[in-house]
Image: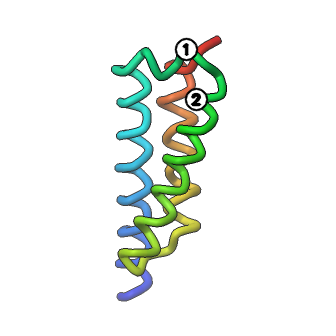
Amino acid sequence: MQFVILGLGSLGIGLASGLVASYIFKRMRFLTVSAIKEVLLTFCFGYLAYALGEMATMSGIICLLTNGVVFAHYGWFNLSP
């Protein structure tokens, strides 16, 4: 039972952080002016997912992986060309 809670909790945290990151890049277009800012914020959102997962005693690796998959799917189109 703990395995299921750990897995679903980690997926939920990663999904939420990936969607928030995608939404922020979509709505705040001034963040996508510089490629350096984009890369820095992408790493920060990834670390945020990992840290939130670890603080919630979930798997930070699964949170980070889920965040990356969600952001790659939804956030890719909101980055600068």
Name the residue at 53% across, 33% down.
Answer: 73
Instruction: Specify the label residue 46 is tagged with.
Output: none
Determine whether, in the image, residue 69 is placed left or right of residue 21.
Answer: right
Q: CA distance from mark 1 to mark 2?
A: 8 Å
Name the residue at 50% across, 19% down.
Answer: 78
Asked if 68 appears above or below 9 in the picture, the reply is: above
Instruction: Specify the label residue 37 is tagged with.
Output: 2
- On the question of residue 4 being in view, the answer is no
As drawn, the residue found furthest toward the bottom would be 1
The image quadrant where one finds the N terminus is bottom left
The image quadrant where one finds the C terminus is top right
The residue type indicated by label 2 comes to Lys
SS of the residue at dot 2?
A: helix
Task: Please provide percent x and percent y for residue 40.
Answer: 60, 38
Q: Are marks 1 and 2 in contact (CB under 8 Å)?
A: yes
Name the residue at 40% across, 21% down.
Answer: 26
Task: Please provide percent x and percent y for residue 66.
Answer: 52, 53
Name the residue at 54% across, 65% down.
Answer: 62
Task: Please provide percent x and percent y for residue 37.
Answer: 58, 29
Instruction: Specify the label residue 33 is tagged with.
Output: 1
